[in-house]
Image: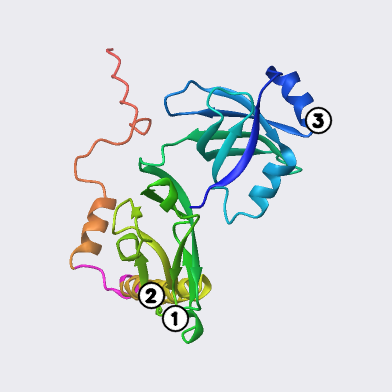
Amino acid sequence: MKSVPLNAFPRTLGRRAGAKKLRSEGRIPAVIYGGKNKAQNVEVNAREMGELITHSVSENLLVDLAVKDDANPKRLALVQEVQHHPLSGHVLHVDFHEVSPTEKVTIMVPVETTGEATGVKNSGGVLEHVLFKLKVRALPKDLPEQVVIDVTNLELNKTIHIGEIKAPEGVEILGDKHIPVVSVALPRAEEEAAPAEGAAAAAGDVEMIKEKKEGEEEGAAPAKGAEKGAAKAAAPEKGAAAPAGEKKAAAPAEKKK
């Protein structure tokens, strides 16, 4: 990654009110940390910072930060984070991470594809991005702004995994080698249609079996002795006591003359 020059100034105003005033004057509050120096609050020109981001492939920028009137005026730093206004998109704050040109650093870089996949062109598939960023490690000068994957030979139902990506010279791609990055698959509508049809057929089979079973039960002859058992159960047993309330009144005793 080629470094670009950027001017910075020690921050004169702090806190929220100070940051708001800085932005109204065309400057952006920032902080630089890392390395052997303590974290330092600085400010950068909003127009210069905006142009750097606009003309960059991503917000992964390597800058030669020139801090005016500082004991260490030249500092190599990576743009670690850029905060944007949620509505206007204007830059609100920038974090710079100071790095050494001789030490490897680890950053996240975006993944881009090039070419038209065979599975898309000839088989009606859809190119799917599974990972949009990859973690890489390299010296600052070797850091890529993005990782580009050629998908021209990617066929239907095939996938490119992390371990299959050729890293740029001097760059190591980190992560599980078996994790998918891009693939070509059938459109979702077609994938869902096949299982739905199979599910409907299976449901029909179950219903038919169920109806047949119920028919057999309805037409089945009663078991032998079932009617006799039912009649026997319905008839009272000999000598059984009559239900309560139905007992005959006892005959009155004869009066003695």
Looking at the rendered image, the disc whose residue lies closer to the viewer, 3 or 1, is 3
Q: On the image, numbered disc 1 is attached to which residue? A: 119
- In the displayed image of the protein, which residue is found farthest to the top? 257
Segment colored magenta: 217-223
x and y percentages locating residue 69 in the rendered image? 63, 24
User: What residue did someone put label 3 on?
Assistant: 25
Per the model, the C-alpha gap separating discs 3 and 1 is 53 Å
Residue indicated by mark 2? 157
Q: CA distance from mark 3 to mark 2?
A: 55 Å
- What x and y, as percent, mark residue 30? 62, 30
Q: Secondary structure at mark 2?
A: loop
* Identity, as a three-letter code, of the amino acid under mark 2: Asn
Q: Quadrant of the C terminus?
A: top left
In this picture, is 240 found above or below 14?
below
* 113 on left or right of 213: right
Check if mark 2's residue and mark 1's residue have beta carbons within 8 Å.
Answer: yes
* Quadrant in the picture for residue 81: top right
Q: Kindly report the distance in space between the C-alpha atoms of the residues bearing marks 2 and 1.
A: 8 Å
Label 2 vs label 1, nearer the camera: 1
Q: Quadrant of residue 21?
A: top right
Under circle 1, the secondary element is helix
Q: Residue at x 63, y 40 (%)?
A: 6
Up-down relation of residue 118 to residue 25 (above or below): below
At label 2, counting other C-alpha atoms closer than 10 Å, the crowd grade (few under 14, some 14-19, many 20 or more) is few
Query: Residue visible at 49% across and 57% down?
Result: 146
